[in-house]
Amino acid sequence: MSARTQGTDTRWIAAAGFGLLLVLTVILARTPAATAYEISIYEAYDWYFWAIACASLLVGNVVIVRSAAEETTDWIYGLLLVASVVGVLVFLPYFRGYEVFGRADVLSHVGYIRDIQETGAVGAGNIYPNFHLLVLGLGYVTGVEPSTIIMGIAGLGSLFSIVSFVALVSAVFDRQRALLSLPFATVLVAAQSVPYVFSTLLVPFVLYLFVKERQTRSLHVRAALAVTLFGLVIYHPITSLFLLFIFGVYGVAQFLSDRNLLGTAGDRPADTVGAVPLSQLVVAVFAVWYLDFVAIVERFGTVVENLAAPGGVDSPVSTYSSTVSQYTPALVDLVRIALVRYGQSAILLTIGGLSALAFAGSVLRKRAGWDVYRSSFVGLFVLFTGLSGLFFVFDLLVGFGRPLLYAELFGALLAGSFFYALASRTESRRTVHSALYVTLALLVVFSTFGLYASPHSVDENQQVTRAELEGSEWYLENRDE
Amino acid sequence: MARDQRRDGRARSTVISLLDIALVVGIALVTYLCWQYTAGWAAPLRVGLGVALVVVLPGYVVTAAMFPERDRQGGSTPGALSPLERFTLSVGLSVIVVPLLLLFLNFTRWGITPGPARLSVLAFTLAVGAVAAVRRLRLPPTHRFALPVGQWVRTAGSGATRVDIVIGVLLVLSVAVAGSALVQPGDSETFTEFYLLSENESGALVADDYPSERNRSENGTVHVGLRNAEGHTMNYTVVVEVQEFRSVDGERIVTSRTELDRYRTELQPGDSNRTEQQFSPPTWIEGGRFRLTFLLYTGSVAENPRIDDAYRKSYIWVDVPAREAGA
């Protein structure tokens, strides 16, 4: 079969995927909005809605993978299909007609935004003003209530994270590796609109700017990176702290590469790091600024205490184990919960782990083929996986989920190269592609059903009803002060 | 003649190379007009253009000012951008720059209020757009960035295959259907407020200090509130009962009940009323605790009203001192 015929076939597969997308939107339009609190958004639509969503995501990914092999531009259709379906999924709270989506944290941030609305100023205790100002800016310009706007912020960030992931892998990898990485771009998709999640969704963009700055040494890109890092600190300082780790590991990888210790001499990028980059300086200054906050200093105190007395009762691992031993749930329930909550993580950590092993093997055998960026990604994957494990076992600064997100991101960035290496070293390319499709199918299912809190993950829907909001308002108006 | 043609060519080249910036300025100004007209039909337009003004345009003009040269074609020009990179930078820099602009307002006498916030985003977009235009015009015409409009037209005209058209139609239909689902009238959530208030020392009605202890000879008062947020006229029935319980294996079982009152009321959408309800402990209470229960029904009332079959319910617990011996 000629490449052109194959390309046309692939495009017809994409057309079938867009047909599924149309069916998906028709189901959306025909399903009435929520009239009251619904405990699970997954039960608001029939099973076939979710099946079609997963199928169309998988079709989009298949188109991208086929396009990588056929050397066509059909991947654009696949990416468009994936982004469209993700767009439907992340904006579901709007389609359900929810008043607000997100309890606890999200409602606190709605409160912070109201404070700015009423006073015209950012309060002294507000350490995430950028997130609030973005929501408020959108509210002011569109005339929509910020409590409605905030529901879509994570969706907006998710779509942007996919686009910037594409820009990043295009800048770092060759065409094949980049395209094979694309199906993993949905790794950061999230529905919870809070500053940390949103700032994390910006990380692929920061990494893209960083790589671009390294490659071009352009003053303009450097200025854009500096402004972005400045803004990111005010979005969420912990994200800046993790970026410091990222830049640090890159520096180490570059140092080792310069001394031919990574076996990278064959394809080292043309640029080399000179003095400490501007980006690191900016982040370091603001990390110091952030450490000035009393709450963080106190948390560091807790870290020290927990490290001195390991196995603290509040660590996630002890919480999980005591819950399991107390309620002795059925094994099938445990497996279901684990898959919905951590299925995506397990897949990406497995791929990342295998990539790290391959990297270690290459270094030991002094084989070329790993450039500084991929070496950095391996280092960062190992670092953040290690941090996740540490935060899982001990009650430290933040929950283990935060570094785990980064471990998943770097696992996703390595995935394309991993499958590329497999395909180029095995005789049966079809087997590798089949393995890739199975992996992607599992990833699509786990990420779709793990997107929203639901009883599947022993959680409840984050919908806040108008009745609840008006009830709270009623109580505040009628309480005896 | 030749000079005129050259001049026309230069003018056309200038127009094409500034088309995107003109588009940005146009969108920004139309958004400004939408702020002035608050008519219902302008709302979707205001939302669509407003999102673009905050999330894309400021970053787009910053990117245009930073990279005035032609986009990379096949990776031949180091430092230039691909269309994907230009879009990524536009969105990324917008979500960074806009909050910083508003943060800047925090330190001015205007504060972060709607008018200055909108104008600052608008002014920034227009000002940086002007810088981008100047920087682009300083380059030779062949080096300037320009939207590849001609290429798009050629692709749409002759390069599109049948499958491309199918995909395009399906995508447009999907967006239209999803868009129509989003703009359908909201307020699908309906409910009725049903609550109790008591009078505090200053005579104000508050959701606090409910009567918690009464002697047999002593009357208590609560106020029953209703508000219709169902979206249509409602006929309500309120049943007031005194219920006594005993506990069997940890479960409460109603042992006796007395209906104190029952009344009906009709409320228009959005209307509310409050009814004063007086009560005193029934004579059969020996002492202990009873539950003053208010049950709200929207249709027919069951023969034996129960808390489980009511549309809404509310209650308070009231203690009654035990009878003295011989009394």
Image (spheres, coloured by chain):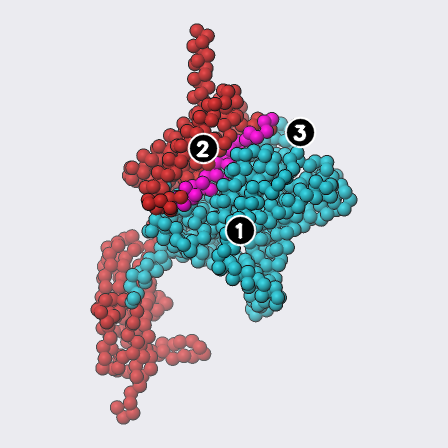
> Earlier along the polypeptide chain: callout 3 or callout 1?
3
Which element type, helix, strand or loop, lies under badge 1?
helix
Q: Residues within 10 Å of mark 2 (few under 14, many from 20)?
A: many
Whether the magenta-drawn stretch holds residue A89 is answered as no
Residues at marks 3 and 1, CA–CA distance in whole angstroms: 57 Å
In this view, the mark in front (3 or 1): 1
Chain A rendering hue: cyan
Looking at the colours in the rendered structure, which chain would you say is drawn in red?
B
| Residue found farthest to the front | A275
Which element type, helix, strand or loop, lies under badge 2?
helix
Residue drawn at 32 percent across, 38 percent down: B35
Residue drawn at 53 percent across, 52 percent down: A288
Residue assigned mark 2 = B61
Residue assigned mark 3 = A1
Given residues A8 and A166, the one toward you in this image is: A166
Q: Are dots 1 and 2 on a single chain? A: no
Residue A30, image x, y percentages: 41, 45
What chain does badge 2 belong to?
Answer: B
What chain does badge 1 belong to?
Answer: A
Residue assigned mark 1 = A287
Determine whether label 2 and label 3 are within 8 Å by CB. Answer: no
Q: Residues within 10 Å of mark 1 (few under 14, many from 20)?
A: some
**Range drawn in magenta:** B76-103
Residue drawn at 64 percent across, 41 percent down: A373
Residue A366 figure quarter = top right
Whether the magenta-drawn stretch holds residue B100 is answered as yes
Q: Main secondary structure of the magenta part?
A: helix
| Amino acid identity at mark 3 | Met
Residue A261, image x, y percentages: 73, 43
Q: Residues within 10 Å of mark 3 (few under 14, many from 20)?
A: few
Given residues A246 and B241, the one toward you in this image is: A246
